[in-house]
Amino acid sequence: MKRLLTLSISFCVIVNGALGQAAGVFEKPYDAGADCQTLSLNAAAVIADGFLKYNMDEVDKAVATVAASCGISEVTMRAKILSKIVRRKSVNDEIRMFYTEEYYRKTESRITTSKSADYGYHYTGRESYYGFVPLGHRVDSIMGNVAIELMAVRSLTDDERLMCILFSGDVEKFEKEWKKSLKHPDMYAGTYRKEMIRSHDRTSCAMVLSSGFYSPVGSRKVIGTNPSFGISFSSPIEYKLSLDLAMKVRIHNNDQGFDYYAMGQTNNVNSSSALFLGLVTGVKHYDTRKFMVQSRYGLGLEVINTGLKEKVRSGGGSTSNDDYDYHDLETLHTSVGLAAFRSINNGRHIGVEVGLHFCPYQLDRNLQTPLDNIAASGELFFRF
């Protein structure tokens, strides 16, 4: 089991790297000819004074000046949002940008790191990440006080209040309230968080559990229709192609006996189970992020348990140490299918798959009874 877990983790890491490039947040490049450190420090001082005097024209002008040469930083984006809330102007576009460009991560980092004793050390070497404004700068405390005052005296929208909670420096409360926003569809914060959860699921490896039936197609009917159970380790579904490392077990309870040559004689056996172990490739054809359709192509090993075994080494009085040679029916297993699944709560997926299978059992020359090589299947699966 430990080896299977290690193999599955390695499989997910390798496939994830092969199918998709690592995601990153890219900022607007700074103008090489601009002294962004000086411009940003000057702007931070003007922004701080502007908020002290409640002179929003002064704040907006400072933001625009530094943005023209150095782009928008977390500090200037925070100032821009706060200024619009003070002016009672629509701030929806800025709030969307604050989330989609992940400025909130920088705000949280800035607030949390500023509280540490060695915040200066953490700032060194990451000046551009913090917008060239040192941690612990007075602009942070001044904007924090403005946010606190707005929450006390102003009627704010839910999204505006959430912004003010973060800007006030209360990261823990912001995270709690942000989670609650999932229950408020009118809040952009909740909409974004839901999409973030879905995106995380779509760009992460997952485990898939399945159950269904497997039924040979043909006139021989030696092996009947039987239940099937599976577990798969799946690569991300964000990309055009996905790859699953799959293991499926069939429980035989509706079969006839068949002849199999082993241990120097022909044995009539009635199999209790069968195993498929292999790779299944999914090709995405339709995706609305809530509903997806894939064609599926499988290739692997088919093993039908015969129950035949012979002792090859004695364990010296302890049967648990005996070594056996197992004589099972083994062949190639190929499949083609169609899967449809939809997103449910917390980024999980539920779906159905139908498939057609081809297993050339006669490749095993020890098989004495012809079996149906073609089978059909259907299953319900849960991806999490």
Image (spheres, rainbow, N blue to C red):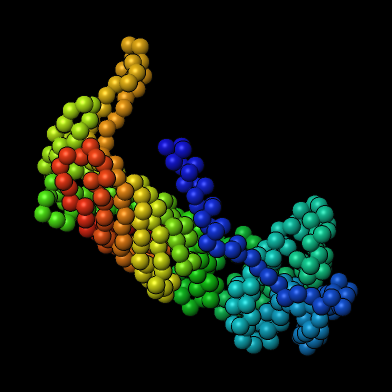
Image quadrant where one finds the C terminus: bottom left
- The answer to whether 92 is drawn above or below residue 1 in the figure is below
Closest to the observer: 143 or 380?
Answer: 380
Q: Nearer the viewer, residue 360 or 279?
A: 360
**Figure check: 272 above or below 297:** above
Q: Nearer the viewer, residue 310 or 127?
A: 310
Q: Is residue 261 visible?
A: yes
Q: Quick check: 57 left or right of 287? A: right
Q: Is residue 70 left or right of residue 334?
A: right
* Res 39 visible: no
Vertical position of residue 202 compared to residue 56: above or below: above
Determine the image quadrant of residue 137. bottom right
Picture mark count: 0
Residue at the spot 23% in from the left edge and 37% down from the top edge: 366
Q: Residue furthest top?
A: 317
The residue at 83%/58% (across/down) is: 124
Q: Position of residue 29 (x, y in %)?
A: 76, 75
Q: Residue at x 77, y 81 (%)?
A: 67
Q: Is residue 90 left or right of residue 300?
A: right
What residue sits 31% from the left and 57% below the top? Answer: 335
